[in-house]
Image (spheres, rainbow, N blue to C red):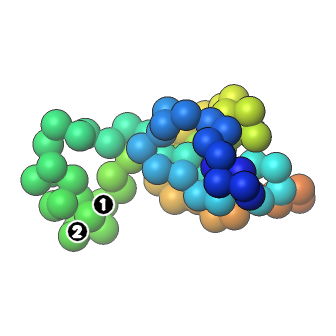
Amino acid sequence: MNQRGHETIGPLFDGADTFSGKRAAVLVGLDHDNTMKLLQQQRSGAPIGLWGFIDSTGTIVVDARFEEVKQFTSVASTFRR
């Protein structure tokens, strides 16, 4: 959503962070058919999906291959495989 509350990118991802440095982290790969498995993974601290980054058009600019990411800046981003 943009600052006016209008949807700019449709629901293509399982989760997303806010835009920072013209990039936003997105979560993919959740098993929506197995809610119990998701809850167990969350409780155990196991990754529930993988994170990547998109630009403001919704184009993937960093493939989803990270268990954890932090805000993207024009200089760098922190992530963990």
10 Å neighbourhood of mark 1: few (<14), some, or many (≥20)? few
Element under label 2?
Answer: helix
How far across and down, in percent of the image, does residue 47 sit? Answer: 35, 56
How far across and down, in percent of the image, does residue 8 sit? Answer: 67, 39
How far across and down, in percent of the image, does residue 68 sit? Answer: 52, 59
Give the numbered dot on residue 44: 2
Q: Is residue 41 left or right of residue 11?
A: left
Residue type (three-letter) at the residue carrying disc 2: Ser
Q: Looking at the image, which residue sits at the far top? A: 59
10 Å neighbourhood of mark 2: few (<14), some, or many (≥20)? few
How far across and down, in percent of the image, does residue 10 sit? Answer: 55, 34
Residue at x 49%, y 37% (from the top left corner): 11
Within the image, what quadrant is residue 21 found in? bottom right
Element under label 1?
Answer: loop
Q: Is residue 66 visible?
A: no
Residue toward you, 67 or 42: 42
The answer to whether 23 is drawn above or below residue 62 in the figure is: below
Q: Is residue 24 left or right of residue 50?
A: right
Residue at x 22%, y 68% (from the top left corner): 44
Residue toward you, 67 or 73: 73
Give the numbered dot on residue 46: 1
The answer to whether 25 is drawn above or below residue 65 in the figure is: below
Q: Is residue 48 visible?
A: yes
Residue at x 74%, y 58% (from the top left corner): 3
Residue type (three-letter) at the residue carrying disc 1: Ala
Q: Is residue 38 left or right of residue 46?
A: left
How far is disc 1 from disc 2 in space, using C-alphas? 5 Å
Within the image, what quadrant is residue 18 found in? bottom right
Is there CB contact under 8 Å for labels 1 and 2? Answer: yes
